[in-house]
Image (cartoon, rainbow, N blue to C red):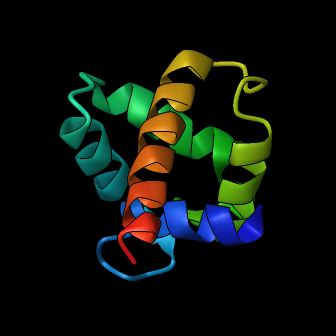
Amino acid sequence: MLVFSTCVLRLFDDDNTNKISFRNLARVAEELGETIDDEELQDMINQADRDGDGEINIDEFYRISEEEGQLPRGPLLRRRLLRSSTHLCFSAESRG
């Protein structure tokens, strides 16, 4: 699961920081056609951000992936973002 999470994290992490920033999350949501206000995006980051740096690292992302439907706010949105990014990840891997 960690290799999979790393692959999906890379889809978000277009600036190669090994973290998901607010900007990364907003970009992916927009690319997926999701209309999400800044407050909801920041709330998603705040819920996942265990170390308090304002971004989501691989360990935090792995935890989200494992608990995707159990987080208190916006689980449907998280599932949609994860499913969409999962599809993109597997498509990219199958192309080689």
Residue occupying image coordinates x 55% and y 17%: 76
Q: How many marks?
A: 0
**Residue 94, relative to residue 86: is it above or below?**
below
Identify the image quadrant of the C terminus.
bottom left
Q: Position of residue 26 (x, y in %)?
A: 28, 44
Query: Could you say which quadrant of the image residue 21 lies in?
Result: bottom left
Q: Position of residue 50 (x, y in %)?
A: 74, 56
Q: Position of residue 41 (x, y in %)?
A: 41, 35
Residue 13 left/right relative to 80: left
Identify the image quadrant of the N terminus.
bottom right
Residue occupying image coordinates x 48% and y 57%: 90
Q: Position of residue 59 (x, y in %)?
A: 74, 66
Residue occupying image coordinates x 38% and y 28%: 39
Query: Could you say which quadrant of the image residue 73 lies in?
Result: top right
**Residue 46, relative to residue 93: is it above or below?**
above
Residue 88 left/right relative to 27: right
**Residue 28, relative to residue 34: is it above or below?**
below
Query: Could you say which quadrant of the image residue 61 lies in?
Result: bottom right
Foreground pick, 8 / 87: 87
**Residue 76, relative to residue 81: is it above or below?**
above
Residue occupying image coordinates x 39% and y 57%: 91
Q: Please, which residue is most extreme toward the bottom here?
A: 16
